[in-house]
Amino acid sequence: MNSSLRTKLSLSYIVMGLFLIAAICLSANYLLEGQFRDYITRQHEERNKELVALIAGQYKSDTGTWDKNVIKNIGVNALEQGMIVKVEDNSGTVWDATVHNNGLCVQMLDHMSKNMSSRYGNFRGGYMENSYPVKVGPEQVGKVKIGYYGPFFLNDNELAFINTLNEMLVGLGLFSLLFALLLGTTMAKRLSEPIARVISAAREIAKGNYASRITEQSNTKEIVELTSTINNLAGTLEQQEVLRKRLTSDVAHELRTPLATLQSHMEAMIDGIWEPDSERLKSCHEEILRINRLVGELEKVAKYESENLILNKTLFDIFELAGLIVHQFEADFFRKGVELKITGETAQVYADKDKLSQVIVNLISNGLKYTDRGGTVEVSVKDRGTIVDISVRDTGIGIPQEDLPFIFERFYRADKSRNRMTGGSGIGLTIVKAVIEAHKGQVSVRSEFNKGTEFTVSLTKKVREN
Ligand code: ADP
């Protein structure tokens, strides 16, 4: 059965509280009670011995008589504490509490029996008697018999003490239960409320309201992580949604221009307004090529972005590869009047050579595209131990800050009107990113508008895997 976090937490706190009470009761009843019983028995034994010593002190050995008045006082006092004293010597009874006041003795025994059954329910006790000898030197001159309600008894003070102790324990137990309940519900509320809000925000996001965010403040680490993860997810989805819409409109836009041109040219020729001469057919052909190129690029990006981009890895010198590519570009750069340089050092990498060539080609051709005459594009390879950085820096037009997060997306172009003139279609960097990510590398960009741009690709040098 699925139950809410709140129910589960509250229940566990209650169970914990009940367990606590059970533990307290058990330990109080078995351990404490047992200890207390032993203590009381020892106490009574001590008291009996003291009493016997006190009575023995009343024997006058020179005359062989007892100070009966003092013994009487001791006996009366002892009776009040639950002890029925009887003193005997060789000639018979010296003093006997039952003779002195039998009614009081019976009353006392009855009182003790009540005390015991009030505490222990069906306590089975009765009158008991211990006998202690009174000696003068080695000679026994008499004996003291102490009767009591046994096997042990609690006098009023002792009973009051143990009752108070038990009441305190019950109170403590009830308080712990109440506290556990209160703490449980508060904790459960504090935990479940933000989660419930996260759930409702996640539902909103699932409905397509990607702008929804969770503003929940919490001091629970996991909840903070959960909210920030959901918010990040919403952010990514929102961005993807924008890009998806943009991609559709971009593709439509890209196709509309050549298709419209083609349509108007064809109609003009069908209606006989234009002669279908080779010049016009060539223009139509160019538009078809444009559409074809776009479709080809769409296919290419789909291939590079597919999750199972298969890498054919070999060990090669990336500096050497960059040098070859730079060499191939030299003529184009010369034609445009842009300087192309390469600096750095040799560095072995274990990677897919063809795909990395494509990456370097895309970055250098962007440098060429977006750098005006008189500018410079510099390729550099830097060995940083386990990592190799390949950067392409130009002194070109730069990328506006607001466009930087999107330039790696398909068909994204920072400055559309200008880019159409340069022939960009917005997939070069998408391919760069897909290839580098497949290599588990990183690509970063730094750019200042109207000053220049630097792309850096970081690859792990020589990791043989798969
Ligand atoms: P494109 O084919 O349009 O160049 P890319 O994916 O290679 O497509 O680049 C995406 C966009 O990023 C470009 O349209 C351009 O606006 C911007 N960009 C890329 N490289 C540079 C650069 N070196 N300098 C200035 N802008 C650049």
Image: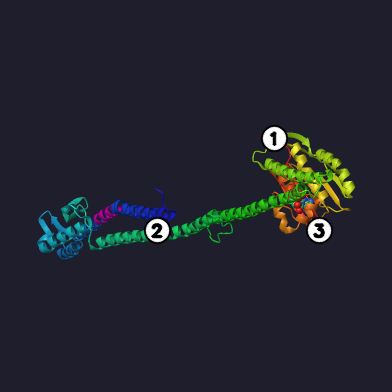
Visible in this render: residue 389?
A: no
Q: Residue at x 58, y 53 (%)?
A: 229
State the mark number for residue 464. Answer: 1
Q: How far is disc 1 from disc 3 in space, using C-alphas?
A: 41 Å
The answer to whether 58 appears left or right of 277 in the picture is left
- The quadrant the C terminus occupies is top right
Q: Which is nearer the eye, 388 or 453?
A: 453
State the mark number for residue 382. Answer: none
Q: Position of residue 292 (x, y in %)?
A: 74, 43
**Label 3 lies in ligand 1 vicinity (Cβ under 8 Å):** no
Identify the mark nearer the N-term, 1 or 3: 3
Q: Residue at x 79, y 39 (%)?
A: 318
The residue under label 2 is which amino acid type?
Ala
Q: Which is nearer the eye, 268 or 327?
A: 268
The residue under label 1 is which amino acid type?
Arg
The residue under label 3 is which amino acid type?
Asn
The answer to whether 293 appears left or right of 39 in the picture is right
Identify the mark nearer the N-term, 2 or 1: 2
Q: Position of residue 185 (x, y in %)?
A: 42, 59
The secondary element bearing badge 1 is classed as: loop
Considering the whole magenta stretch, tell me its main secondary structure.
helix
Q: Residue at x 87, y 43 (%)?
A: 330
Visible in this render: residue 238?
A: yes
* Residue occupying the far front of the picture: 272
Segment tinted magenta in the rendering: 35-45
Q: How far is disc 2 from disc 1 in space, using C-alphas?
A: 57 Å
The secondary element bearing badge 2 is classed as: helix
The secondary element bearing badge 3 is classed as: loop
Residue at image mark 2: 180
The reply to whether the C-beta atoms of the residues labelled 2 and 1 are less than 8 Å apart is no
